[in-house]
Amino acid sequence: MGKVNVGIIGCGAISSIYLEAPEKFDILNITACADIDLERAQAQAAKYHVPKVYTVEELLADPEIDIVLNLTIPKVHAEIARAAIAAGKSTYSEKPLGINRTEAAALLEEAREKKLLVGCAPDTFLGGGLQTCIKLIDDGAIGAPIASTAFMLGHGPENWHPNPDFYYQLGGGPMFDMGPYYLTALIAMMGPVRRVTGSTRITFPERKITSKPFYGQTITVNTPTHVTGTLDFASGAIGTIITSFDVWSHRLPLIEIYGTEGTLSVPDPNTFGGPVRIRRFDDNEWRDVELTHGNTVNSRGIGIADMAHALQSGSFPHRASGELAYHVLDIMQAIHDSSNEGKHIELSSQCERPLPLPVGPKLW
């Protein structure tokens, strides 16, 4: 196969790891980048030898670009992705797919009408750690999954992120920021969710920035910062998820899957490696499991590489798909809706469980 040309919109901190992706995935060829801050785009282009620096409008108009990689801030993810679709290009976005169902659903519908592909981060579930967990579950190592827990608790990004305000606005918060990693991993292992229940709160209405360059400035919090959800999977399993920017310390696991014959300890879903641990009903202690799949280092970009192969071959659905990302968005919004409305929320979306990757050191 030939290379697929990729243009990047948004050259902030996350862009660096994507700009390194062609070193890992030969199918990707990053030909142009754009940013609202032209100097930032020029700096990244110079550092990573990207041949063209564009305005957003110029990038969208370039006929040689096949996929627009959308690395903008969450509140404009859907807007930029829809502009790419309107320009006749497939698009892959950082998470989340959008900040509400309405704009994300419109994006997917417009892509279907034009027969273009939509992909979305996270792609960490394609790493060796989570793919090993998927294989263990599919092989029956813990029996049938009956429940899961997922915990992401900390005290927010204002002490380290250079511009943390957006984390505390609509489309931010711990669930929309980190929930996609955990929910995508759970769906990849256990399938889609049919119903959710949630409770949310804002614990600290104001946050003081202690990172530079905005040290000492105050953030007004406009989105829940402690979010809990109960997930009823279509399979009958029941999940619990807690995401928080309000917790100073804890001793909870990241993700655990509880089966009829044992328990699986899942690695950090914001990484690509292990450790993976299992303890069956007849084990006296936990056992480390050797990883069965490759891509165990930081392999962000594997999702867009998988989509590029699907775009060229048409032989398999890409895994970090828009439908999967929409289902994750639907779950996150429904958890907040449930808290606001005081009731269970039946989900309107479903998605196919992503195809597992073949066993081996590398995907391609």
Image: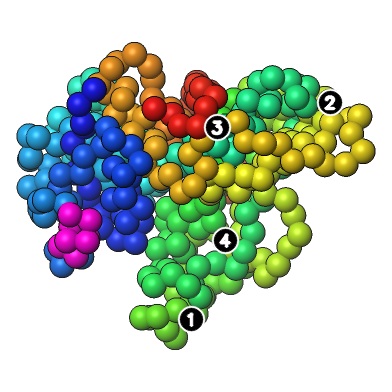
Residue carrying label 1:
210
Whether residue 118 sits left or right of residue 330 in the image: it is left
- Residue under the point 43% across and 29% down: 363
In front: label 1 or label 2: 2
In front: label 2 or label 3: 3
Whether residue 135 sits left or right of residue 263 in the image: it is left
Q: Secondary structure at mark 2?
A: loop
Instruction: Assess whether mark 1 and mark 4 are in contact (beta carbons under 8 angstroms).
Output: no
Residue 32 appears anywhere in the view: yes
Amino acid type at image mark 3: His
Mark 3 and mark 1: span between their CA atoms?
A: 40 Å
In front: label 4 or label 2: 2
Residue carrying label 4:
225
- Residue under the point 46% across and 64% down: 168
| N-term-proximal mark, 1 vs 2 | 1
| N-term-proximal mark, 4 vs 2 | 4
